[in-house]
Image: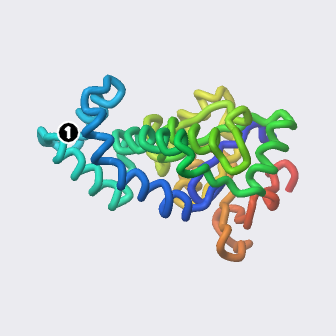
Amino acid sequence: MIRAILTDIEGTTSSLRFVHDVLFPYARAHIANFVRCNAEDPRVVPYLNDVRLTAGTDLDLDGITAQLTAWIDADEKITPLKALQGMIWEEGYGRGDFTGHVYPDAVRCLERWSGSGLRLYVFSSGSVQAQQLLFAHSDAGDLTPLFSGYYDTRIGNKRDPAAYTAIAADIGLPPQGILFLSDTGAELDAARAAGMHTAWLVRDVTPDPGATHPQVGDFDAIVFPDEA
């Protein structure tokens, strides 16, 4: 029986267009000023050092900005980049520059599942801070009370079964009691290899009944394994 839902964000609860057309350009436009103005902030300094460590060279602030911009352009899933993006987005949400997009069907089902006693978790390549900001400032209001926890790449790569094994252990449930939702087949493969049930969100195409994971066009079409 499914006792918890673990969900991706991009392309699953939220539009890829919002992430790629709003959030990423916003971070790119503000990254240089953010690095320059926060270079001595104790919250920021460790991540700037991580950029140098990951790049393998002792970059100055301009070099750090150039490296971060290159990673943004390449859509790299690098922890210090994701952390700094989250801090920039925090400022943007706070100023009301944008709100977090969440599909209405996702809001509806997440609220129903939470109300029925299911525990809800998020696993995204974006930092935990970025995840919380999106749901706290969503188009539908503050959705963070619905969730019991958040996971990012610090727990592992989303295409590595070990990450899902670690999440299940942290949640305190057997993997078989967790349903993972994503729009990416390789992530679903990894979750299933760890023992989780899966559902593949394919919002822009007709679901394929012969796909390697159960495909659905939206959250309303999700059927739990014990209900199938």
* Closest to the observer, 76 or 207: 76
Q: Residue furthest front?
A: 95
- Point out residue 111 in the picture as x, y percentages from the top left corner: 80, 43
Residue 186 placement, left or right of 43: right
Mark 1 surroundings: few (<14), some (14-19) or many (≥20) residues within 10 A = some
Residue 119 placement, left or right of 56: right
Residue 179 visible in rendering: yes
Picture residue at 70% right of the left edge, 46% below the top: 179
Q: Quadrant of residue 209?
A: bottom right
Picture residue at 12% right of the left edge, 42% below the top: 57
State which quarter of the image contains the N terminus. top right
- Point out residue 201 in the picture as x, y percentages from the top left corner: 67, 62
Picture residue at 66% right of the left edge, 52% below the top: 181
Q: Residue furthest top?
A: 42
Q: Quadrant of residue 167?
A: top right
Picture residue at 54% right of the left edge, 37% below the top: 151
Q: Secondary structure at mark 1?
A: helix
Q: Which residue is mark 1?
A: 52
Q: Residue furthest bottom?
A: 206
State which quarter of the image contains the C terminus. bottom right
Q: Amino acid at mark 1?
A: Arg
